[in-house]
Image (cartoon, helix red, strand yellow):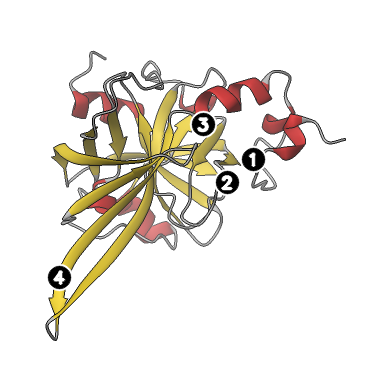
Amino acid sequence: MQNLVDKIPTLLEDGASSATASSPGFADLYEDCKQSVVRVVGKTFFSKNDQPMVTERNGSGAVISANGAIITDWHVVKGASEIDIETASGEHLIAKVIKKDPLRDLAELLIQTKTHRTFPFLKLAAPGRHESAAFALGLPAGEKNCYVSPTAFLEESSYRSLAITRDVDVPPGNQDMDRPIMLLKGRTLSAESGAPVLNRRGQVLGLVDATDSTSTIVATPIEAIRTFLKRDL
């Protein structure tokens, strides 16, 4: 019989923290954290040849407050007519953008659907200690379970530097090319932009922003997230 750890959907990479998913207590940590990770779908409605059409942009996000505030990447919801939130349990909710920072590719959403309950949420990590990044946790499109992507911290950098040294798929939009980013060894599934990068305490240390062709995750660090949310550093 498989134990719970064996059943956790995991993407492992050489050089990443491949022991993460088999660490003592990780199954409980995964179960706790996945309740606060959501799929974010930005839907844009339009008409073509007098026919109603819709396009979707998929990503992930992290619930960060009991009242349903969510942090994700701006490029996931940019221009969306409607934002659909799907939880790990399959519940569908509607959210709206309450704050955005296109230059740093960050957006704060708030669930609008009346549920008459509070939401489980992830805590933000303290600034620094980027090397404690343990795994990214996303809810990709078409998947029923959250996926664990073990990570290992590589270095701090900027998109301007990456444009010179690496083949990076920079998210669309008016990006601040000099903003600080974290580079992590690891691999995510498609449509996991906005997935939280967590430490071994299950605290948000960053958000997945992009990946490159060498299985490197580009993440927005916690300092930028706290500044965006105006949380004390």
* Circles 1 and 3 in contact, beta carbons < 8 Å: no
Please, what is the three-letter code of the amino acid marked with disc 2?
Gly
Quadrant that contains the C terminus: top left
> Marks 2 and 1, Cα distance to the nearest angstrom?
6 Å
Q: Is residue 12 above or below residue 45?
A: above
Q: Which residue is mark 2?
A: 186
Q: What residue sits 24% from the left and 45% below the top? A: 105
User: Where residue 69 sits: x, y (%)?
Assistant: 26, 28
Camera-side mark, 1 or 4 = 4
Classed neighbour count for the residue bearing mark 1: other residues with Cα under 10 Å, few (<14), some (14–19), many (≥20): many
Label disc, if present, on residue 98 of the rendered structure: none
- Residue sitting at the far right: 1
> Marks 1 and 4, Cα distance to the nearest angstrom?
42 Å
- The residue lying toward the viewer, choosing from 82 and 160, is 82
> Marks 3 and 4, Cα distance to the nearest angstrom?
33 Å
> Marks 1 and 3, Cα distance to the nearest angstrom?
21 Å
Camera-side mark, 4 or 2 = 4
Label disc, if present, on residue 46 of the rendered structure: 4
Q: Quarter-wise, where is residue 228 in the image?
A: top left
Please, what is the three-letter code of the amino acid marked with disc 1?
Ala
* Circles 2 and 1 in contact, beta carbons < 8 Å: yes
User: Where residue 78 sits: x, y (%)?
Assistant: 19, 53
Q: Earlier in the sequence, mark 4 or mark 2?
A: 4
Q: Which residue is mark 3?
A: 34
- The residue lying toward the viewer, choosing from 30 and 175, is 30
Label disc, if present, on residue 16 of the rendered structure: 1
